Image (spheres, helix red, strand yellow):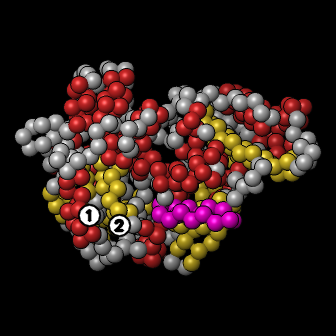
Amino acid sequence: MADSIRFILNGEDVALASLDPTETLLDFLRLKRRLTGSKEGCAEGDCGACTVLVGRLVSGRLVYESVNACIRFVGSLNATHVVTVEHLAAKDGTLHPVQQAMVDCHGSQCGFCTPGFVMSLYGLWLTSENPDRAEIERALQGNLCRCTGYEPIVKAAEQVGQIRPSALFDPLERERAEIVARLEELATRETIAITGPDGRRLVVPGSIEDLAETLAAHPKATVVAGATDVGLWVTKQMRVLDPVVFINHLEELQTITVTPEGITLGAGVSYTSALEVLRKEIPAFGRLITRIGGQQVRNMGTIGGNIANGSPIGDSPPALIALSATVTLRSAKGTRTMPLEDYFIDYGKQDRQPGEFVESLFVPRTKADSHVAVYKITKRRDEDISALCGAFHLETDAEGVVTHIRIAFGGMAGTPKRARSVEAALYGKPFTQAAVDAARDAFDLDYKPLTDWRATADYRQLTAKNLLTRFFLEVSGTPQELQRFAAEEA
């Protein structure tokens, strides 16, 4: 068993044998290392002022991703390379091309958010040659600026996109082979256990078997994958968590398997990692992924974590329930699998026994002629929490009669929930305007939504009914969704 978290910070090796299990990377950088380029704007992963890159080995390949340092815990960083804005410029003060482009295009005014924008653009620049406007805007979804209006920042991204990484000026390209070797040395299959100054504990299991044993011994432990929810428990709700078990490094939970029967997603698969597969296999689900948080949140957050958290406004459960997904839970005693809709019992309560964790999700393959749609309703299009999210899966026979219909909504009840009365009103009938109009009233039997600051109960109920009508219109060949980047969403 190991007794320290080890990672690389810019060019320096870091080893921590004593650590608060919920110390954020941002606090570590600013307060302990005096790397103050990263700023705290929101402390909840919304504004992007704290953005840094975290590099990790994925099947032997070094991958850098933008993350929110304000909600990323230091305990999750073992065998990673943390890169801050201070690492970009040359030692003689020459700006990195990304930084210079921001200067040339006047992409900064007050400057508070600028380091975060630079790091998001740097992450894009490392992975995409000559990105188009859609790619640039997607990369910047998680960065907010109150001064420039974004256009100069987009122009900076377009300018630097024409310059490719070179060992002459880019530190990550110059050091890549060295960093890979150092990270391979830091990687371990040993379980790491650390006690903080106040006696609270953190555990980094060496394997999925070690995770099961750890949770058997500590069934009330808080399991942290991406921390996009748990981070806010600490920064906003000031919860004291003990012990904390970090699982974001476990490759066994990060597999994606596509077979003729369907898709199996490990619980640790991030939204970013799942995006291309879902875009190809279930396009409507793929479009939803691009509207979950910003790029930093999608790099950190996991679909399994979204399920395990059990939030009634989580975006992925309605789509997965409509697609008849199943969830597999694991513990030291073995595994069990159930329909995902049965996993959600009541508000804040899931069918997960002490010591169990979400291991994987299975999504059956849809028929080629079926219709799938997912609708996310928010106050703003990007980086917002849903007022409600609805998903539809329809199959009809040659005469247009409904042979299969599943409808699920989040934000309409204490759990993600199917609209069974609406389904019953449609099943076995021709899928026509008249049938849809008649089925709308059945929503009143299925849901009694609440009023909160995101939406009123009446708005939610009417919107759910209207989404059924929208789904019918789209199935009938009338496009209803406004899409700015048609090529990207195709």
Q: Are marks 2 and 1 in contact (CB under 8 Å)?
A: yes
Type of the residue with mark 1: Val
> In the image, is 2 to the left or to the right of 473?
left
Which residue is located at x 38 percent, y 38 percent?
130
Q: Secondary structure at mark 1?
A: helix
Question: Can residue 173 be seen by looking at this rendering?
Answer: yes
* Residue 229 vertical placement versus 388 (above, below): below
Q: Earlier in the sequence, mark 2 or mark 1?
A: 2
Left or right? Give the position of 370 relative to 231.
Answer: right
* x and y percentages locating residue 193 in the rendered image: 30, 70
Residue on which the image places disc 2: 60
Q: Closest to the observer: 21 or 210? A: 210
Residue range corresponding to the magenta coloring = 254-268
Main structural element of the magenta stretch: helix, strand or loop?
strand
Image mark count? 2
Q: Residues within 10 Å of mark 1 (few under 14, many from 20)?
A: many
| Crowding near the residue tagged with mark 2, few <14, some 14–19, many ≥20 C-alpha atoms within 10 Å | few
Q: CA distance from mark 2 to mark 1?
A: 8 Å
Give the position of the N terminus as an image quadrant. Answer: bottom left
The disc label shown at residue 425, or none: none
Q: Residue at x 65, y 41 (%)?
A: 374
For residue 309, say whether it is visible: no
Q: Which residue is mark 1?
A: 180
The one nearer the camera, 99 or 298, is: 99
Q: In which quadrant is the C terminus drawn?
A: top right
Spot occupied by residue 90 in the image (x, y as percentages of width and height): 12, 43
Q: Within the image, what quadrant is residue 426 found in?
A: top right
Q: Amino acid at mark 2?
A: Gly
Viewer-nearest residue: 191 or 368: 368
Any magenta on residue 213?
A: no
